[in-house]
Image (cartoon, grey):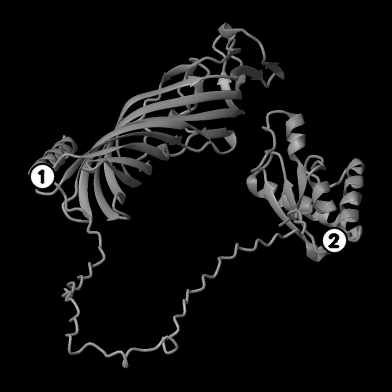
């Protein structure tokens, strides 16, 4: 109740301040989308894929100074994620109610895909900073804290199944792969329901926007931006137990089980929208103008007729110049230099083709060869794989400056520590074979990933054999 009261107080305070503000305030609307993910981890139990989502929002902003302002908004977001379970779990020392026999329950998740969807409403309280980039373009940066309320939380399986079987150790009997629900042996695949996460939580976010003013009044701005938000509270609500209860055939969902760690949500994407100034007029950005140079006043020149000489002042005939004494009149005209056309220089040199990166023989070979597979709990290289190492060594000798990376892998049988050591031994085994073939040991680096990077799920003996391998790559 205290949280709701605080939120209502902040809303009333912000809106009231904006209404009576002397500076302009803004109303904004935007839509967008991006990565809207429900975050959790599955570890070795399966894989998780982030989903895409939609966002729409309304906001009220008050810029109380030239650069700073506050705002209040309401956003709607959709979030999505997909989890795929691929593992088996056993519950031993159970007693059959019909015959009193001791048995072990085996539940196998065969690539069961669960799609989770959420709809949330956020109320962000923001602090803004703005800077004018040009006469019409401004940068707007905001940070916020927000209250988030979940409107809908649903899950639904869309592929794979769950197989339930029984094993009686006293008689070495395995009842699996049957469809006998009455005796607890069956497979199921279609589930849907509510995720039952916390409905109320808090988060923080940020946004960067470019606002371009339209028209002569510049009251309407076209907005382009990016945003990010993180709801940092764990949304799991008293979750415990297994994903599936084989006794009641009840499916909880991944987020309500012990498999998922902390459940949170994150948004990141882009948005477009409009921003409208509806308050008092803001001070327009000042534009520097070049000073106008004052013109000099025109000087009036009085045109006076030349004085005519009087009769007494008229020159006599003797004073008149003779024809021979007449000054020669030379008609001088300025010479006009004709403008010469520009000279065009044509480069007929053939243009060379752009250089293409050359791929070495070793790089091309490593992109096509399979991993070096090894038997269970062994570092022995099969004879069929030795020809691959011959080719690698021969290709390396063409360019002995190339560095090779060897990565050892294992299946999921055994502890993580044991598998990490076994992966390292497998990589060293392949390194020794390459050194025996003439490759410099200084040009080889080894590492181990243990059972952390399977190429296929460890759900069968065939798949586990594929994961027992050494990968050969070229170090860049």
**In which quadrant is the C terminus drawn?**
bottom right
Residue 408 falls left or right of residue 37: right
Q: How many marks?
A: 2
Given residues 428 and 367, the one toward you in this image is 367
What secondary structure is found at the residue carrying circle 2? loop
What secondary structure is found at the residue carrying circle 1? helix
Which residue is farthest bottom?
A: 318
Q: Looking at the image, which residue is at 36% across and 37% down?
A: 272
- According to the picture, the residue beneath numbered tag 2 turns out to be 399
Mark 1 or mark 2, earlier in chain: 1
Residue 289, position in %: x, y?
25, 63
Label 2 Cα crowd, 10 Å radius (few <14 / some 14-19 / many 20+): few
Label 1 Cα crowd, 10 Å radius (few <14 / some 14-19 / many 20+): few
Residue 346, position in %: x, y?
70, 59
**In which quadrant is the N terminus drawn?**
top left
Residue 279, position in %: x, y?
13, 42
In the image, residue 113 sits, relative to residue 129, either above or below, namely above
- According to the picture, the residue beneath numbered tag 1 turns out to be 17
How far apart in space, not on screen, are marks 1 and 2 (Cα)? 72 Å
Q: Quadrant of residue 179?
A: top right
Residue 211 falls left or right of residue 418: left
Given residues 229 and 461, the one toward you in this image is 229
Given residues 394 and 48, the one toward you in this image is 394
Q: Looking at the image, which residue is at 49% across and 25% down?
A: 115
């Amino acid at each position: 109740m205290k949280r709701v009261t605080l939120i209502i107080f902040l809303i009333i305070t912000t809106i009231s301040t904006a209404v009576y503000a002397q500076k302009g305030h803004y109303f904004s609307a935007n839509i967008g989308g991006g990565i809207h993910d429900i975050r959790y981890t599955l570890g070795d139990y399966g894989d998780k894929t982030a989903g895409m989502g939609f966002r729409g929002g309304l906001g009220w902003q008050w810029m109380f100074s030239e650069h700073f302002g506050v705002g209040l908004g309401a956003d709607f977001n959709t979030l999505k994620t997909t989890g795929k379970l691929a593992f088996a779990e056993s519950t031993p020392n159970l007693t059959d109610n019909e015959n009193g026999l001791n048995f072990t329950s085996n539940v196998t998740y065969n690539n069961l895909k669960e799609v989770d969807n959420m709809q949330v409403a956020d109320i962000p309280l923001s602090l803004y900073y703005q800077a004018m980039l040009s006469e019409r373009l401004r940068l707007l940066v905001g940070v916020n804290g927000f209250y988030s309320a979940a409107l809908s939380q649903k899950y639904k399986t869309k592929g794979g199944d769950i197989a339930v079987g029984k094993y009686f150790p006293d008689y070495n009997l395995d009842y699996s792969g049957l469809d006998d629900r009455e005796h607890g042996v069956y497979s199921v695949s279609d589930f849907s329901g509510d995720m039952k996460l916390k409905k109320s939580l808090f988060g923080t976010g940020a946004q960067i926007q470019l606002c371009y003013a339209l028209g002569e009044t510049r009251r309407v701005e076209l907005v382009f931006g990016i945003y990010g938000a993180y709801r940092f509270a764990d949304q799991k609500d008293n979750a415990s137990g297994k994903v599936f209860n084989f006794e009641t055939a009840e499916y909880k969902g991944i987020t309500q089980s012990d498999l998922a760690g902390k459940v949170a949500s994150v948004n990141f994407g882009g948005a477009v929208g409009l921003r409208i100034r509806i308050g008092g007029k803001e001070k327009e950005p000042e534009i520097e103008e070049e000073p106008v140079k004052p013109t000099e006043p025109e000087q009036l020149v009085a045109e006076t007729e030349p004085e005519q000489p009087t009769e007494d002042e008229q020159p006599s005939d003797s004073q008149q110049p003779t024809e021979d004494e007449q000054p020669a009149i030379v008609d001088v005209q300025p010479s006009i230099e004709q403008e010469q056309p520009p000279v065009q220089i044509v480069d007929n040199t053939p243009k060379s083709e752009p250089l293409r990166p050359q791929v070495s023989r070793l790089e091309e070979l490593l992109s096509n060869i399979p991993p070096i597979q090894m038997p269970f709990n062994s570092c022995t290289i099969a004879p069929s794989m030795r020809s691959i190492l011959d080719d690698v060594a021969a290709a390396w000798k063409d360019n002995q400056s190339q560095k090779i990376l060897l990565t050892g892998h294992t299946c999921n049988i055994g502890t993580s520590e044991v598998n990490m050591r076994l992966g390292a031994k497998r990589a060293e085994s392949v390194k020794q074979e390459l050194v025996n073939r003439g490759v410099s040991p200084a040009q080889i680096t080894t590492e181990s990933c243990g059972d952390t990077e399977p190429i296929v799920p460890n759900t069968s003996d065939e798949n586990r054999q594929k994961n027992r391998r050494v990968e050969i790559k070229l170090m860049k």
